[in-house]
Image: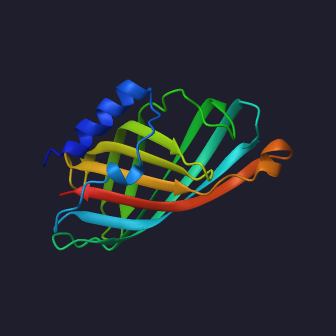
Amino acid sequence: MRTRSLVAALSAAALVGGGVVAAAPSAWAAPAALGDLVCTGSQTAHFSPPLTNTPATVTATVQENYNCLSVLSPISSGNGGYTAVRPDNSCLLSLSPLGTSQVIYRWNTGQTSTVTYNNTNVVRAANGTTTTISTGAVTSGYSTGSLVTRELVAPALSLSACATTGVSDETGVATLTVLL
């Protein structure tokens, strides 16, 4: 397992900014080494009840799908899913920390990796795009002990939907990097 300055930078940013920082997301992305597992794909979230401008307890059911590349790993694709309940969820950017989350990734090789994300930072750009960067480690399964970074870029939410019926689904671009 390699330690990278990315983990220190994200940890410091989470402590200083309470989970929300104003730095450009690309400043956090550490380059992957040749053998690291780099996966790109999408994340789709279903919100129940739909997100509106009024904070409410919302259950998000999330599915991630990836295509992967690595010189050292036979993994070429994978997916993961989880459910999260947040008491103050809305279309508005929340300043409250997201807390620890756990995702089980299932790989095309039949293996799984359980990843525990401990640090999550959210940045909302002026155009409404939201970038969420989570860091953690594989706690069981394939590549136990490896550091993991997940970056999600979600499009701006519909202002009219947020003000009326709500947003029930959202799909964004996802990148998952496992430092082998």
Say which quarter of the image contains residue 50: top right
Residue that appears at 72% across and 30% down: 56
Asked whether 83 or 11 is in front, the reply is 11
Say which quarter of the image contains residue 75: bottom left
In the displayed structure, does residue 4 sit left or right of residue 10?
Answer: left
In the displayed structure, does residue 150 sit left or right of residue 166?
Answer: left
Where's residue 81, x and y in %?
Answer: 49, 53
Where's residue 180, x and y in %?
Answer: 17, 58
Q: Is residue 67 above or below residue 87?
A: below
Asked whether 26 or 43 is in front, the reply is 26
Residue that appears at 50% across and 63% down: 173
Give the residue furthest to the right: 164
Residue that appears at 18% across and 46% down: 4
Q: How is the image coloured?
A: rainbow
Residue that appears at 47% across and 47% down: 132
Q: Is residue 113 above or below residue 73?
A: above
Where's residue 30, x and y in %?
Answer: 25, 54
In the displayed structure, does residue 47 sit left or right of residue 141?
Answer: right
Give the residue furthest to the left: 2
Where's residue 88, x and y in %?
Answer: 65, 28
